[in-house]
Amino acid sequence: MKSILSSETMEIPEGVKIKVKAKLIEVEGPRGKLTRNFKHLNLDFQLITDDEGKRKLKVEAWFGSRKTSAAIRTALSHVDNLITGVTKGYRYKMRFVYAHFPINASITNSNRSIEIRNFLGEKKVRKVDMLEGVSILRSEKVKDELILDGNDIELVSRSAALINQVPFQNKS
């Protein structure tokens, strides 16, 4: 069943600037600027101020199906991830796990790529480049731990996934 109007709002925290232009959301904060394209969704985005003067982002779906109404909350969650990224940032931690052959890793290209050696005793060197805006470090406190930092949660998590899957590429 279609509903006439479905809408949700979210508050914009202090120190964060949001620009909305034709379903292209640009969020700017202390850690940088992130943009997200929502042109594939049939939603309307508006910046509003409420009675107390707080800035809010309003997302509306006119004559939307159940799926379109569910996309409202998804879009707001993506914008919330952008806000968290430009204020706090995201950090993923990974550990090397091995039984007999200790995995060696060296971080190269000014914290932009990692080379993995001695995986299961192999001589092959596996190189993984981080995605744009993601830096990688070795933990000083914990042995065999990698720390991935960045503003965009999708790029940081994809970089972690690239590291995780690199030993088994081209295997069937």
Image (tube, grey):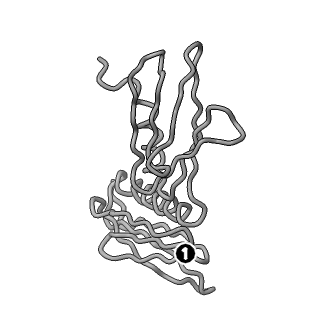
Question: Nearest the camera: 141 or 27?
Answer: 141
Residue visible at 46% across and 72% down? 58
Residue type highlighted by circle 1:
Val
Residue 140, given in percent of the width and then of the height, sits at 68, 42
Residue 127, given in percent of the width and then of the height, sits at 39, 35
- Residue ID for mark 1: 16
Question: Nearest the camera: 39 or 91?
Answer: 91
Residue 63, given in percent of the width and then of the height, sits at 31, 64
Residue visible at 56% across and 53% down? 90
Count every numbered label the image shows and give the total: 1
| Number of other residues with Cα within 10 Å of mark 1, as a class: few under 14, some 14 to 19, many 20 or more | some
Q: Quadrant of the C terminus?
A: top left
Is 47 placed above or below 43 here?
below
- Answer with the quarter of the image where residue 47 lies: bottom left
From the viewer's perspective, is 86 left or right of 131? Answer: right
Residue 163, given in percent of the width and then of the height, sits at 45, 35
